[in-house]
Every structure is written in structure tokens, then in C-alpha cells.
Amino acid sequence: MPSKYRSPVLDRRSFVKIVSTALGSMMAAIIGLPAIQYFISPALTKTVADEWISLGSIDNYPMDIPTMFNFTLRKVNGWEKSSMSYGAFVLRKEGEDPVVFSDICTHLSCRVGWDDEINQFYCPCHAAFFDQLGNVISGPPPRPLDQYEIKLEGDQLFIHLREG
Amino acid sequence: MAENIFSWLDERLGLKTIYDSILDRKVPKVNWWFTLGSATLFLGVMQGITGILLSVYYVPTPDHAYDSITFIMTGVQFGWLIRGMHHWGASLIIMTAFIHMLRVIFYGAYKYPREVTWITGVILLICALGMGFTGYLLPWNQRSYWATTVGTEIAGTVPWMGDFLLRTLRGGSDLSALTLSRFFSLHIWIFPAIILTVVFTHLYLVIRLGISNIPDQDS
């Protein structure tokens, strides 16, 4: 190449290096940044639930024994319409408002059961035990069982389900 | 510091040698038609990246395939972009690969000692068409369903073994969930595994033998 065409500051090789690095980074960014957003976007959309669930007549539930009530809620996750199942324990005491516990263990969200013989809630995953009022007796849970907000209309019992 | 780390690694891995033999190798004076191999490689890498990303949401079953793609297009941010790139890249890569092949034919670049490079290239083109054929079914919409019906039916017209080929492609006599899942498997595992192996052979040969001159009047 005649010297009058030669740049005094940049030789051909460095020019090509700079241009390919710049173009390469641009292309990587164009695909890379949307890819990150693409991957995490379902994590950013919250499925909200806020409704009152009817648990039927309060007279169906015995005194002093936490009694399981199962219900399902239809939800849409991605393209899938699915029925999520929930469990609630209703505890009635003479002369007091009923208490309704969530069956979700406060440790790592396994489902707790009620054991009549020892009169305790237990979670089989990590050997957690709760007393009749949901307080932790032993095991790893950090707090008592969660309670639903309740509402009584006549003898009809409702709980308030809130998520998201 | 960075230089020290580099020379420590280079002494053990021979990075400079790799760089020199891939990027600083000697090439004859060539023209723009010689960029199509690299263009095809670039598109192939993009198909790989966008394809892996699509597999985050796509589900290869008749009851979810279509819905999962609708979800990618409307429910996921930039899903349209990722799928769009995969969709258009698929057509483009066939074009670049084909024109790349035409250049090799017209310049006689397939001749001694590059016959094996040519053969591996042909295998790659067939695999690319296979990727196109199998990928076309995956959206599981009317067009892909009937295109695959016709495509497998064409395989069925082969003398003697046609029926066997058709049934093997479909995984039975009908287009079904089995067809979808085997096309999916071919599309994301079997063809990519073959392509990866053959691409490395192809590139190794290009680097080992160098690329050919543009033929002049004497040749």
C-alpha cells in the first residue's frame, strides 16, 4: 500500500481488531441482554390471589380437634391452567372464635398433618411439631403456623386467602 | 499481572499457538464469497444459543407444544425476539450454507487435497436440512402437522423400504405424540451431536489444508 494511504495513527491490523471487538460486543449485548430478561421474566410476574373461601357451616367442625378442610384454586402458570390444592385446619373452642391454620409448615413449606394420638401437628420433612394452637414445640420452624383471617356470616365460615 | 497469568496459561495450554493457527494463518487473496463459511458458522452458533433459550419454555408434547410457544411469543419478555431469530436464522443458514457450497463448486475448491472437507460439508448440509425438517414440526400447528404428514409420506414412496422409513420417522403409522417427541429428540440432541462433531472436523481440515486460491486462467 502506498504510504500516502497509510494512517499515521492506526495500522490496518489494529483497526480490524478494534472493529471486530466492537461489533462482537454489540452483537453479544443484543442477544445477551434480552436473553437474561427472557430467562427471568416469569419470576417477575406475580400471580395474585385475594378472595374469601367458604368453609361451610361452622357446625360441621368438632370442638377442640383441628380438622382439615381441603380446597382447590384454579391458577394460570405460564400456559398451564392448573388446580392448586390448599389445606386449612379449623380449630373450634367453646366460647371463642374459631381459628384456621394454614397447613404449610413455616420451615420449608412441606404440608403438616394432625396427629390425634400425640395431639400435635407434625411435619414429616424435618421432624417439626406444633401444639394445638400452632406454636412450635420442637424442630426447625422459625415461627408458629400461619393463621387465615376469618369471617363468620351466621354459621357460615369464610377464610381470606391472600397471595402475591 | 494479566500478562503473567496469560504467559503462565500459555506455557501450559499453548494459547498463542491456537490463536496463530486459527486467526493468523496465511490465506490467499480472496473475495467476499469466501466469508460464507464463517457466516454459516456464526448463524449455526446463533441457532444453538437461541435454541437452548427456547428449550427453557418449550414443551414437546401435543397438549402443551402449541400453548408453550404461544406463551413464548406473548407471555415472556423478548420471547418474540428469541423465537424470531431462531425462525429466520433457520432459513438464512440454509441459504448461506448453500451459496457457500456453490462457491466451492465454482472455484473447484473441493479438489485434491480437500475432498474430505467437501464430504464433511455435504454431511453438514444434510444435517442442516434435517434440522429444518424436524424443527418445522415442533410448533405443532396446522402447518407443521400437515407439512410433516406430507414430508413423511414422501419418505414412504421410497421403493422396498418406504413403509419402514415412514413408520420409523413417525414412530408408528400415524403422526402422533411419538412423532413429536422423536422429532424433538432429533432436533435438540441427535442432529446437534452429529453437527458439532462434523463441524470440528470441517474446521480442522480448513485450518490444516488452508483455503484454495481463486483459480486463474492457467488452472
Image: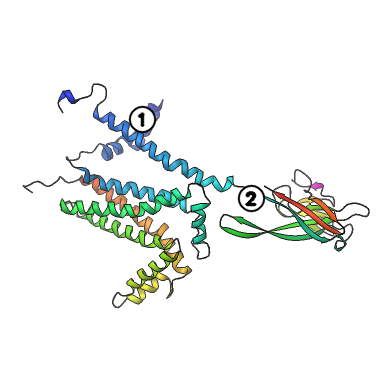
The secondary structure type at the circle numbered 1 is helix
Image quadrant assignment for residue A9: top left
The single residue placed furthest to the front in the displayed view is: A153
- Position of B126 with respect to A57 (left or right) is left
Q: Nearer the viewer, mark 1 or mark 2?
A: 2
- Specify whether residue A119 is in view: no
- Position of A152 with respect to B79 (left or right) is right
Q: Main secondary structure of the magenta part?
A: loop
Residue drawn at x 32%, y 52% is B92
The single residue placed furthest to the right in the displayed view is: A95
Q: In front: B216, or B85?
A: B85
Labels 1 and 2 share a subunit: no
Q: Is residue A141 above or below residue A78?
A: above
The residue that label 2 is drawn on is A47
Question: Does the magenta run of residues contain B119?
Answer: no
- Position of B19 with respect to B167 (left or right) is left
Dot 1 amino acid type: Ser
Dot 2 amino acid type: Thr
- What numbered label is drawn on residue B7? 1
What chain is tagged by disc 1? B
Q: Which residues are magenta?
A: A132-143
Q: Is residue B158 above or below residue B95?
A: below
The single residue placed furthest to the bottom in the displayed view is: B160
The single residue placed furthest to the top in the displayed view is: A8
- Specify whether residue A3 is in view: yes
Q: In front: B195, or A81?
A: A81
Q: Quadrant of the N terminus of chain B?
A: top left
The spot of residue A65 in percent (x, y) is 86, 58
The secondary structure type at the circle numbered 2 is loop
